[in-house]
Image: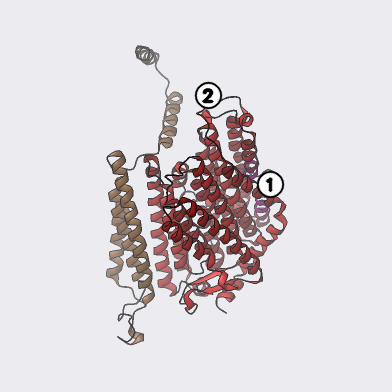
Amino acid sequence: MRPSIVLLIAVGVLFAAGTTLLLERTLTRVLLGVMLLGNGANLLVLASAEPGAPPIVGTADTAAMTDPLPQAMILTAIVITLGMTAFLLAVAYRSWRLSGHDEVQDDAEDRRVRELAERDEGSDAEELDADDLDAETIEEVRR
Amino acid sequence: MTWLVPLPVMMPLLGAAATLLMFRRPRVQRVISVSVLTATLAVSALLLVLSADGPLVVAVGGWPVPLGIVLVADQLATLMLVVSAAVTLCVLLYSIGQGGADGDEEHPLSVFHPTYLIMTAGVTNAFLSGDLFNLYVGFEILLAASYVLITLGGTETRIRAGTTYVVVSLLSSVIFLSGIGLVYASTGTLNMAQLVERLDALPDGTRMVLQGMLLLAFGIKAAIFPLSAWLPDSYPTAPAPVTAVFAGLLTKVGVYAIIRTETLLFPGGRVSDLLMVAALSTMLVGILGAVAQSDIKRLLSFTLVSHIGYLLFGVGLASRAGIAAAVFYTLHHIVVQTTLFLVTGLIERRGGSTALDRLGGLARAAPVLAVLFFLPALNLAGIPPFSGFLGKLGLIQAGVADGGVLAWMLVAGSAITSLLTLYALARVWNLAFWRGGADSPPAAPLKSPRLMVTPTAALVIAGAALTLAAGPLYALSDNVAGDLLARTPYVEAVLP
């Protein structure tokens, strides 16, 4: 079987663009990324069958028909992608309703652990200047 | 008796439809879902008995076998079915108890029961599937339901945690689908039994690409390091019963798919070494993460990641003893990890929090709760005579029998992980249960009704009973491993 190069290039472009968008922080862009990736995967499945006449009984010789199985699989995959897209859209909307934007925040617990680590590093790695320390304590007392 | 095979998928799906129609009648919903899951458990147990004589095969819709979808109930699938049905039933009862206690009789989330049943159907479909694309559909069913469950209620923290989970899962689904496309392009079939011979005929490089794609997709779902970062980030925010069933079952579906890929589709080869390295790093990174946590739910999520490493260790060995131990350990881990998360839910109700610095003195205040935590904690850490010890012993014996450098490193790694698990859980025990009082006064405890405690206790007892039944169960796992490695029983049952 010789897959069509145009189809494969399209798959590559869709995957590349989808991956780039998936790495964004905004949920709507992530959603676009997921859609592009899903379509890329669908095209890849389509490319797994030899091109030929439409697989409808009676319209062409069975030997000249293309394999209908990948198309059946793509139909299933399209329905699944549709559902997931709707769900992600709802999540993005909910996030916007709750926080006024749809950017994905860092995990609170992760942030806490990172802060602890940074504080730890500061006390170990740098020897505090006596003057600095005094200035800091004074400021703290003032507060 | 093959007509029984589709029932574990069909019954929860029909039950989901029925509970969705009854969304205004929470009591009817509860009756339907409990009876559906009880029936699923009964059918699964029957299938386990029947599959002893060889796999049961059903061609769905009567399509000729390599063309249509087949459901295959071999001993591995039925064993997983029985354990998962038992666990989902217990968690359902627990969640009903929790709903009743929190007084949401008037305003229950009507979507919970249908979604929960759909997730069960997805899990059973993934176990029974004899076709790669149907396996993908099974995964999608359970994932779609899990997206709803993890964002249940739509609060800000759940939406945030759910986003990570959903996006990562969607990525793994795309990888899986692309893998399926490539498998179909190179072999012209997706029937697993037919794939066995056609994949063997492919050149090594092609096989490696296909195997890599599938393992990558399943690895994300099973939370194997370095593909595991999403799990401790997203699981802890969900409601206790949801986290429990996710921790027990969803990652194990990924492991099940890896076992199938590694034994049936791509046996042998150099990827086993890669799996062993991944197993070692999953164990160590996971458990070091657990040691650093100060919240019980997050700590347990990290031990979950870490113990996936044990399962992978057995699969990576690719010997009969290794796979037998991995299968036994999977069964043990489903029960014990679910129990621990359910107990954590009870701790949260009693102490008002799951943060270790806000808990204390629970051993005196709630002795039953202390026992319920203590037994599965020892079981997970692998203290003899619990099943966790037996599973780890089996893995270590299989590793020693293998004798390679990697196998020895994994033997050492699993001993260290076991000790560190004990350390992490002993910390929870000391801080939450053993010491006098909390650093800050706890909130007023919520009631824990009997309907929440009883299923938890049942699972604790089931975990302990795994020790009593270890002889026959281990023999069964060994039998499963023998069939998996031989491959012919599966292939001959599907393509006579």
Q: Which of the 4 quarters of the picture holds residue B419?
A: top right
- Measured as percent of width and height from the top left, residue B197 is found at 52, 75
- Measured as percent of width and height from the top left, residue B148 is found at 41, 51
Any idea which chain is the red one in this picture? B
Q: Earlier in the sequence, mark 1 or mark 2?
A: 1
Any idea which chain is the brown one in this picture? A
Is residue B195 placed above or below B29 in the rendered structure? below
Is residue B375 placed above or below A57 in the rendered structure? above
Is residue B357 placed above or below B216 in the rendered structure? above
How busy is the neighbourhood of tag 2: few (under 14 within 10 Å), some, or many (20 plus)?
few
- Measured as percent of width and height from the top left, residue A50 is found at 34, 77
The residue pinned by badge 1 equals: B386
The boundaries of the magenta stretch are B376-397
Q: Kindly identify the amino acid type of the residue bearing the numbered disc 1.
A: Phe
Identify which residue, B350 or B317, lies in the foreground.
B350
Q: Residue at x 58, y 31 (%)?
A: B432
Magenta span contains residue B392 = yes
Q: Relative to B123, is B179 on the left or the right?
A: left
Q: Kindly identify the amino acid type of the residue bearing the numbered disc 2.
A: Asp
How busy is the neighbourhood of tag 1: few (under 14 within 10 Å), some, or many (20 plus)?
many
